[in-house]
Image: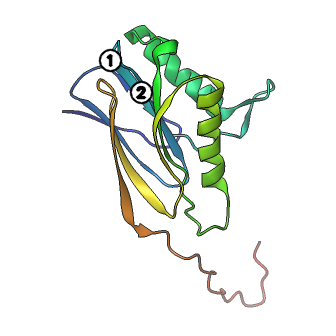
């Protein structure tokens, strides 16, 4: 089996039936794309996709999605045939930030705006996800990581002998 692990900001594409792409998601999202005719797929791992990129007002996520799609095209994928699956967007800090929800919303909006049907979605909640995607078949398997994110704690005060550290 040809196993590829991707982390934040990375993506992988392929059409080898033995290829599996995997990642672990917290508040990040992954969008798995698949062309069922060409049997080509790809997956990314997006961190803060709604952040602005460059002077054109594009988001980092939109740029990353375009890169993913453009890597699939030479393998035979065609944009009108693409199907998607969306995962991630957990609230890893027990509701203290909305990063996960914002990331999931970016994914939904991007797919809707680009007219890419989303066949499956599993986003939100307090747990991380382990994700595997087989690009040649479009099959995705997701498992929740059973441990929830730990409750944040304050750092213990450090003795400084009257010296202020900054």
The x and y percentages for residue 27 are 55, 53
Name the foreground residue: 31 vs 58: 31
Task: Give the image quarter of residue 42.
Answer: top left
Q: Is residue 127 left or right of residue 19?
A: right
In 3D space, how far apart are the residues under numbered discs 2 and 1 (Cα atoms)? 10 Å
Name the residue: 65% across, 86% down: 158
Q: What residue sits 71% from the left and 86% below the top?
A: 160
Residue 60 is situated, as x and y percent measured from the top left of the image, at 66, 33
The residue at the point 62 percent across, 34 percent down is: 61
Q: Is residue 22 left or right of residue 32?
A: left
* Quadrant in which the C terminus appears: bottom right
**Of the pair 83 and 145, the residue shown nearer to us:** 83
Q: Secondary structure at mark 2?
A: strand
Q: Nearer the viewer, residue 80 or 45?
A: 80
Give the class, few, some or many, for how many residues have Cα within 10 Å of label 1's Cα (few <14, many ≥20): some
> In the image, 31: left or right of 112?
left
Residue that carries the numbered disc 2 in the rendered image: 42
User: In this rendering, is residue 35 above or below 54?
Assistant: above
Front of the two marks 2 and 1: 1
The numbered mark at residue 96 is: none
Q: Residues within 10 Å of mark 2 (few under 14, many from 20)?
A: many
Residue underneath mark 1: 39
Quarter that holds the N terminus: top left
């Amino acid at each position: 089996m040809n196993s590829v692990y991707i982390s934040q900001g990375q993506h992988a594409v392929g059409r080898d039936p033995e290829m599996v792409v995997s990642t672990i998601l917290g508040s990040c999202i992954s969008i798995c794309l698949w062309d069922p005719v060409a049997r080509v797929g790809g997956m990314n791992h997006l961190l803060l996709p709604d952040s602005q990129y460059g002077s054109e007002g594009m988001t980092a996520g939109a740029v990353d999605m375009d890169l993913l799609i453009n890597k699939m095209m030479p393998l035979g994928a065609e944009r009108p045939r693409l199907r998607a699956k969306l995962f991630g967007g957990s609230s890893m800090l027990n509701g203290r930030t909305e990063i996960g929800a914002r990331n999931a919303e970016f994914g939904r909006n991007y797919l809707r705006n680009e007219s890419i049907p989303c066949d499956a979605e599993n986003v939100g909640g307090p747990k991380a996800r382990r994700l595997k995607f087989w690009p040649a078949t479009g099959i995705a398997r997701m498992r929740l990581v059973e441990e929830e994110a730990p409750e944040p704690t304050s750092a213990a005060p450090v003795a400084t002998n009257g010296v202020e550290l900054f």
